[in-house]
Amino acid sequence: MTGRVPLYQAKAEFFRMLGHPVRIRVLELLQDGPMPVRDLLAAIEVEPSNLSQQLAVLRRSGIVTAVRDGSTVVYALAGGDVAALMRAARRILTEMAAGQAGLLAELRETEAHPL
Amino acid sequence: MTGRVPLYQAKAEFFRMLGHPVRIRVLELLQDGPMPVRDLLAAIEVEPSNLSQQLAVLRRSGIVTAVRDGSTVVYALAGGDVAALMRAARRILTEMAAGQAGLLAELRETEAHPL
DNA sequence: CTGTAAGTTGCAGAATTTTTCAACTGGTCG
DNA sequence: CGACCAGTTGAAAAATTCTGCAACTTACAG
């Protein structure tokens, strides 16, 4: 019944879903607890409709939930330890930065080609 | 000097770099140690040029390194605990699947709109 | 030198994703 | 009811990413 997707593909889709600045910020903000769209909007600087689109991506993936409360909509993390994921990512990012990875990797790429 | 990028954007780029099935499989294979392209190619089923393109993405990001050994090129993780990241991702993925997130989220989306 | 295997690169076309604008739904208030 | 505010949706245009083919480089064998 379920569209039987190989695990590595599910992972790729999951990471791709995370691969957007606005979506990252939303997830980080929601780590401090549920938050109405209004507040996300105030914190993120992006057009309402654009934020809505990104929220829809997060909702479809199932990583957040939305509940209507009167005229406002409140978003929350659906569960899962998102904080742990972000920490793991930041650790790698830090190591890569320290190890001259990011910038230098690109320089290496364009200068004296070792490959 | 460095193209001063906000952290949330660096994170988004990082996750986007991970958002491709072939790249995920490469990273998973490299967790067992360095591996020549030939072996990656045998394990992944993708055209050589396509694999090369994906390897180039990983290289540019700095998450892997490439070393030429004779006529073969050997790839390796550049450091960072990639395994921890994958574990964190899998945990969330599992929780989302268990909590009827993925599939049901989409159903919810198309049926009786709570939003 | 010639041929060949291993990878990479440049590109063009195809496919996806982002962004934006306009229109729309649900509540709330007077 | 009529006017708004909060968000969402649909759709088209713009920007990115993917894929596959052809050409190229490097190393090695004969």
Image: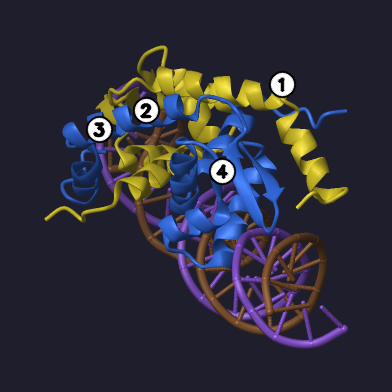
Chain colours: A blue, B yellow, C brown, D purple
Check disc 3 and report the residue beneath it: A94
Who's the residue at 61% across and 59% down the image?
Answer: A52
Q: Nearer the viewer, residue A58 or B14?
A: A58
- Which residue bears the numbered disc 2? A87
At a point 21% along the width and 46% down the height, the residue shown is A103
**Which quarter of the rendered picture does the N terminus of chain A lie within?**
top right
SS of the residue under disc 3: helix
Which residue is at a point 25% across and 42% down the rendered structure image? A102
Mark 4 or 2 closer to N-term? 4
Element marked by disc 4 = helix
User: What's the chain of the residue with tag 2?
Assistant: A
Task: Report the Cα–Cα distance between label 2 and label 1.
Answer: 23 Å
Q: Which mark is residue A17?
A: 4
* Residue type at tag 2: Arg
Neighbor class of circle 2 (other Cα within 10 Å; few <14, some 14-19, many 20+) is some
Q: Give the labeled residue for mark 1.
A: B98
- The mark closer to the camera, 4 or 2, is 2
The amino acid pointed to by label 4 is Met
Question: What's the distance in space between the residues labelled 3 and 2, CA to CA?
Answer: 10 Å
Task: Give amino acid for label 1.
Answer: Ala
Q: Chain of mark 4?
A: A
